[in-house]
Amino acid sequence: MVRWSADRGLQARMLLTMFLLAAVYLIFINVIMAMGVGIQGVVLIMGVFLFIQYFYSDKIALASVGARIVSESEAPELHELVGRLCAIAGLPKPGIAIVRTDVPNAFATGRSQSSSVVAVTTGLLRRLDKSELEAVLAHELSHIKNRDVAVMTIASFLSTVASVIVQNIFFLGDRRDRESGSLIAVWIVSLVVWIVSFILIRALSRYREFSADRGSAIITGRPSALVSALMKISGTMARIPKEDLRRVEGMNAFFIIPTGAIANLLSTHPPIEARIAALERLEREIL
Amino acid sequence: MGFIDFILGSTKLPQPKSERLFAIATARVTLEAKLGLKPTGSAAICIKPLESSTYERTRAEIEDLLRLGSRETGTAYRIENDSYGYMWVVLTDPEFEDLVSGVHMVVGSLTDSGLGQQLLCAVYPFSNGFKVYWIFSFKLGAYYPFVPSREKPRSERDSALELRLRSVMAEELPIEKDVERWYPIWEMPL
């Protein structure tokens, strides 16, 4: 039995991000209240809206990509795989859905562990072998176990409110506000909150991905299976050349790999290389 | 590259980066302990084709060197040419340490006689029922794994296993980061 040490660094970064996010939100609420602008209505409406979204998000997400829930008789092997992983992870078995597209992908949805659905695309099923598929499913189950849908919905609530204010500022507030010019100040504050919280939420999302990768490695006991799945999905495997070294020697082509610091800051998922490096550290830990 | 070279254009080839070649000596223990991969008892150096007079001189030099060296360690050697016109110096010795020092000796003497730029790669094969090659590129100054697939050993490679080898060995071997440069060498003479 392998004993997995907790990734303290990751936990610390996640906590710091959540703390900063909470701080930004607190400042936001205080500033808005101090200005005495009537946006309570907006918050209330958005609250109701997000509450509904929270309860229907799984259905919305599944319907928007055309995922179809499959029964045990339709996809016995997939059900068997998920069932076994759930037994190991101590989770109730989620629903399973298949999306008909050749893009290799998978996602998990649902606000609670019991109402979750794991969806995979036909492209993913076609490309991955059994152990790689298992690793990807375990990654999605880790998202369910970590309650990532709930965490991210709550984390983005006030950010969404700020974005609504930024976009609809001049339909809000009463006449007095509009004439006093304080609406402009609210607009600026909301814009700043929106941008800062957006970056923080994306960071949080990336940490949750690392965490789910780790969860997958712990459930399956094979970090390398997720590494090779990630490589296949991202096409890294296909980048390993087949042309003989002696044939290409002398061409000495330049290789330019773009490194997008800004792109990294704004993406929901960490770069594949970073995820693979983290998994490779785990692999060395267990060998 | 100096400023003058930058302005006028340089024809100098980069010097071989062989400092990190030695890493295989310690990595070998991990390869066996974690993956059951044992050295096959041979290693090779691949040298780019030379013009014929230099070629003969180099070949004679290497042979002299190996003859002297093998007297001490008992390392057997042979020199072969492949279909690409490359010269292969293949060393055979049951002691892995002697193989590693043999490879170093050849690399060192070629570099000393100004032929370092002709060095293409050094290869250390390992086996666990199937062959795994660690190729050291002198251009990159790093190793990378090459595993011919069991079904089609002449044209297909087992990339999944290669990537796993990278995961396991990343801390002990200097491994080339860019997988696009992991060029295979098909049908090696060892």
Image (tube, rainbow, N blue to C red):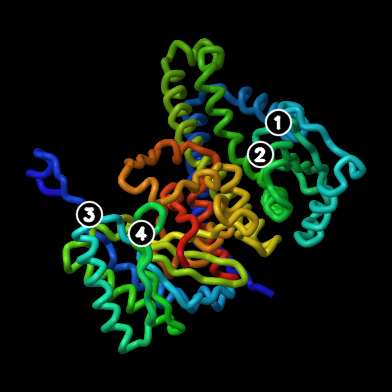
Chain designation of label 2: A
Indicate the quadrant containing the C terminus of chain A: top left, top right, bottom left or bottom right.
Answer: bottom right
- The residue carrying mark 2 is A105
Q: Is residue B88 left or right of residue A218?
A: left
Looking at the image, do the residues carrying marks 2 and 4 touch, with CB atoms under 8 Å apart? no
**In this orientation, does residue A146 appear?**
no
Label count reads: 4
Q: CA distance from mark 1 to mark 2?
A: 9 Å
- Viewer-nearest of discs 2 and 4: 4
- What residue is at 61 percent from the left and 23 percent from the top? A42
- The residue carrying mark 1 is A101
Q: CA distance from mark 2 to mark 3?
A: 54 Å
- Viewer-nearest of discs 1 and 3: 3
Chain designation of label 1: A
**Residue A185 position in % (x across, y down):** 42, 23
- The residue carrying mark 3 is B51
Q: Could you say which disc has been placed on residue B96 in the image?
A: none
Three-letter code, disc 1: Thr
- Viewer-nearest of discs 1 and 2: 1
Q: CA distance from mark 1 to mark 3?
A: 56 Å
Question: Circle 2 sits in a helix, a strand or a loop, which is it?
Answer: loop
Looking at the image, do the residues carrying marks 1 and 2 touch, with CB atoms under 8 Å apart? yes
Looking at the image, do the residues carrying marks 2 and 3 touch, with CB atoms under 8 Å apart? no
